[in-house]
Image (cartoon, rainbow, N blue to C red):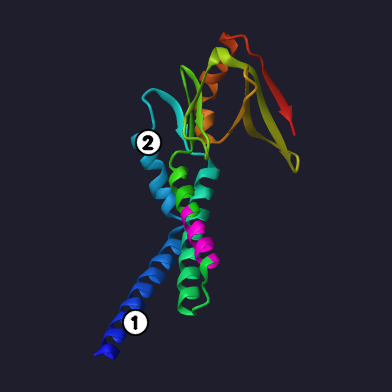
């Protein structure tokens, strides 16, 4: 009777471990494309205000999301393997648990990582910030556009704003930001801020 009870318990553990390992493998394999299909629509639904000239998540938000998602899978597999091999001690449990929680927290914070530009000014929320920062056009002290030279070909790099409180934030000059560039340059001119062009 006791042996039967032990067998059932062991089988249940095996089933749970199989589910965990399968989940972990799915997380790792889907880490590349899940952020693309999930991050942007979620932010557009819950964070994007009306009237923005451009709203997007930085590339680093997608990268962070992917790495954190894959890390969750790795920590789950590590936890299952250590437990199955009976090599996991108290310290091991703490390390695996902390790693899993940190990865999960990073995934959640990635949803809150974005920036946008509109008529009011520039706005951004960085990865480990829980509060969006707003700067009006009148609060911009300096604006720089960097250009990089790749094998003799000049291409736009970043639009960098320095604010009167000393904060600096850079928008990568991708296709989305370029759509807002004319309107942004107009606002800078209206507020007496000269755009400085720099070549790296």
Residue 8 position in % (x across, y down)? 28, 83
Residue 24 position in % (x across, y down)? 43, 66
Q: Is residue 108 above or below residue 49?
A: below
Which residues, given as a range, are shown in magenta? 91-101
Q: Is residue 47 above or below residue 87?
A: above
Q: Which residue is mark 2?
A: 44
Indicate left or right for 178 with 166 as reference: left
In the image, 100 versus 177, the foreground residue is 100
**Residue 52 location, quadrant:** top left
Q: How many marks?
A: 2
Quarter in which the C terminus is drawn: top right
Q: Are marks 2 and 1 in contact (CB under 8 Å)?
A: no
Disc number lying in front (2 or 1) = 1
Residue 176 position in % (x across, y down)? 50, 33
- Residue occupying the point 36% across, 79% down: 14
**Residue 112 location, quadrant:** top left
- Residue occupying the point 36% across, 41% down: 42
Q: Is residue 4 magenta?
A: no
Q: Is residue 200 above or below residue 195?
A: below
Q: Earlier in the sequence, mark 2 or mark 1?
A: 1
At numbered mark 2, what does the secondary structure look like: helix, strand or loop? helix
Q: Which residue is mark 1?
A: 10
Which is the main secondary structure of the residues drawn in magenta? helix
Indicate left or right for 35 with 178 as reference: left
- Residue occupying the point 54% across, 24% down: 181
- The disc placed on residue 59 is none
């Amino acid at each position: 009777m006791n042996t039967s009870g032990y067998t059932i318990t062991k089988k249940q553990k095996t089933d749970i471990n199989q589910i965990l390992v399968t989940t972990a493998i799915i997380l790792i394999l889907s880490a590349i494309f899940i952020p693309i299909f999930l991050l942007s629509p979620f932010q557009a639904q819950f964070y994007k205000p009306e009237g923005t000239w451009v709203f997007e998540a930085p590339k680093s938000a997608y990268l962070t999301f992917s790495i954190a998602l894959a890390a969750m899978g790795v920590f789950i597999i590590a936890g299952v393997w250590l437990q199955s091999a009976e090599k996991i001690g108290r310290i091991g449990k703490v390390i695996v648990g902390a790693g899993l929680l940190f990865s999960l927290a990073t995934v959640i914070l990635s949803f809150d990582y974005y920036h946008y530009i509109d008529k009011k000014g520039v706005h951004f929320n960085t990865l480990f910030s829980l509060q969006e920062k707003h700067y009006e056009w009148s609060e911009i002290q300096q604006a720089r556009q960097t250009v990089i030279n790749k094998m003799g070909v000049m291409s736009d790099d970043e639009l960098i704003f320095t604010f009167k409180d000393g904060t600096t934030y850079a928008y990568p000059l991708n296709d989305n930001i370029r759509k807002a560039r004319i309107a942004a340059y107009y606002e800078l001119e209206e507020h007496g801020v000269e755009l400085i062009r720099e070549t790296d």
